[in-house]
Image (cartoon, helix red, strand yellow):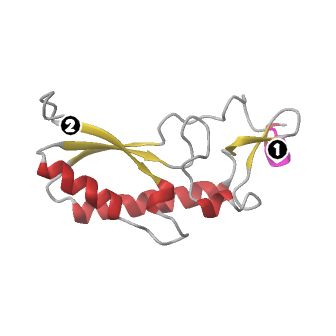
Amino acid sequence: MEYLHANTVEIPVYWEQFEPKEGQFDNSVVDTLLTQARAHRMRLVLLWFGTWKNGNPHYVPEWMKLAPERYPYVVDKDGHPADSPSPFAAASLAADAKAFAALMRHLKTADPQRTVLMVQVENEPGTGGNLRDYSPAVQKVVR
């Protein structure tokens, strides 16, 4: 980036790295990004890869992936589970919001120099190739 004379780097923060165990936040990756950016006189734009990235749950923590009854997935129109978290899953929203708030609190204390210019939330959300969730819970709302 120095060779290109760039002054800002956009880089993701993966929820599964940030909260590997429920309620336990690991700031080490973020701290490394801050340290390295400052060492090279760069600014950061962070992307929060939380519940969705391209409509898939690839960046949610393993503890969520292993609990689909608590953090349900989209059901396609044929009644099959899809590889996408349900946008109607209140527990998923609450967990993502809690983790994102922890990230922002950490940045507030760890980045008084304002190395981070902005944070993009939930890059490329969607439902992984499905128009919507057809789960019974959603069907009650849309009818």
Q: Residue furthest right?
A: 78
Neighbour tally class for label 2: few under 14, some 14-19, many 20 plus, Cα within 10 Å = some
Instruction: Specify the principal SS of the magenta part.
Output: helix
- Mark sitting on residue 60: none
| N-terminal-most mark, 1 or 2 | 2
- Residue 71 x, y percent position in the rendering: 69, 57
Residue 35, by quadrant, is: bottom left
Q: Nearer the viewer, residue 47 or 5?
A: 5
The residue shown at (51%, 71%) is 23
Q: Which amino acid lies under the numbered mark 2 shown in the image of this protein?
A: Thr
In this figure, which residue is indicated by the disc labeled 1? 135
The residue shown at (23%, 63%) is 110
Q: Which amino acid lies under the numbered mark 1 shown in the image of this protein?
A: Ser
In this figure, which residue is indicated by the disc labeled 2? 8
Q: Is residue 129 left or right of residue 3?
A: right
Neighbour tally class for label 1: few under 14, some 14-19, many 20 plus, Cα within 10 Å = some
In the rendered structure, which segment of residues is drawn in magenta?
134-139
Secondary structure type for disc 2? strand
Q: Residue furthest bottom?
A: 24
